[in-house]
Structures are given as C-alpha cells and as structure tokens.
C-alpha cells in the first residue's frame, strides 16, 4: 500500500504536490508508475497513462489519454481506477505550455 505522500489517490499527495508548483499547470495526465529501472539497462519499469475510459491503458492500445485541468479532478479519477497493477504508484505528469 502506498504511503500518503507517494500516490495520487491519497489527499496528502494532492496537497504536497500543489505546494511545490509555482503556478497551476495548464493540464495534466495521470501516470501509473510500476517497476524499477530502465528496461534498456535490465530494469523492469513500465509506466502507463490513464485513458479516457477511466482505466490504465494497456501497452499497444490506441485509446486516448485522459486530460485533467486540475489535480483534484485527477485525484478523483485515480480513486476510481480498477485495473492498477500491484505495488504501482499513481502520479501526475503536469504540463505548463
């Protein structure tokens, strides 16, 4: 189970992440982080994005990623994901441009 500061479905993650931003981003994606290390160098990392279906998009899928205007919206969507992999962490990929 992730600790409060590590994963998007936890309220504390939302609070601490917003405090680090100088300005709110224009939009963000939800990212499921799983594994360790770059696969090119023998690691097992396999990060995936949340799709418009509300589920983590499997590798090779043509589904579009879900885009969020606020971290609160991303947080609510994260709480509804049912296809997360064990020991994964959820985060946001924020974009300011």
Image (tube, rainbow, N blue to C red):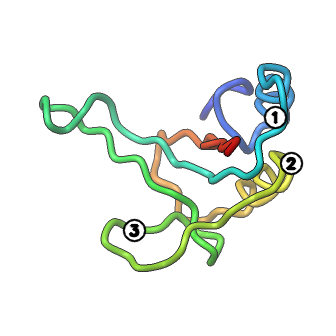
**Secondary structure under the numbered disc 3 in the rendered image:** loop
Image quarter in which the C terminus is found? top right
| Rendering coords of residue 26 (x, y %) | 77, 49
Q: Between 66 and 56, which is closer to the camera in this rendering?
A: 66
Q: Are marks 1 and 2 in contact (CB under 8 Å)?
A: yes
Q: Position of residue 59 (x, y in %)?
A: 33, 66
Q: Residues within 10 Å of mark 3 (few under 14, many from 20)?
A: few
Mark-to-mark CA distance, 3 and 1 = 25 Å
Which of the two residues, 85 or 22, is positioned nearer the viewer here? Answer: 22
Q: Residue at x 85, y 21 (%)?
A: 19
Q: Earlier in the sequence, mark 3 or mark 1?
A: 1
Disc 2 residue crowd, few under 14, some 14–19, many 20+, Cα 10 Å: some
Residue 50 lies, with reference to residue 92, above or below; the image says below
Q: Which numbered disc, 1 or 2, marks the residue that appears first in the sequence?
A: 1
Tag 1, which secondary structure?
A: helix
Q: Nearer the viewer, residue 20 or 25?
A: 25
Q: Could you tell me residue 48's position as x and y percent?
A: 44, 54
Q: Classify mark 2: helix, strand or loop.
A: helix
- Residue underneath mark 2: 72
Image quadrant of residue 58? bottom left
Give the residue at x 41% y 79%: 62
How many numbered circles are shown?
3
Q: CA distance from mark 1 to mark 2?
A: 7 Å
Q: Could you give the CA–CA distance between mark 2 and mark 3, rounded to whole angstroms?
A: 24 Å
Q: Residue at x 75, y 58 (%)?
A: 68
| Residue occupied by mark 1 | 14
Q: Which residue is mark 3?
A: 58
């Amino acid at each position: 189970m992730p600790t409060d500061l590590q994963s998007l479905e936890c309220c504390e993650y939302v609070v601490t992440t917003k405090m680090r931003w100088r300005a709110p981003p224009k939009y963000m994606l939800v990212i499921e982080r799983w594994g360790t290390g770059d696969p090119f160098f023998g690691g097992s990392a396999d990060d995936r994005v949340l799709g418009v279906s509300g589920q983590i998009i499997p590798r090779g899928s043509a589904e579009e990623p879900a885009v969020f205007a606020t971290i609160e919206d991303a947080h609510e969507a994260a709480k509804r994901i049912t296809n997360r992999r064990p020991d994964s962490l959820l985060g946001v990929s924020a974009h300011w441009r």
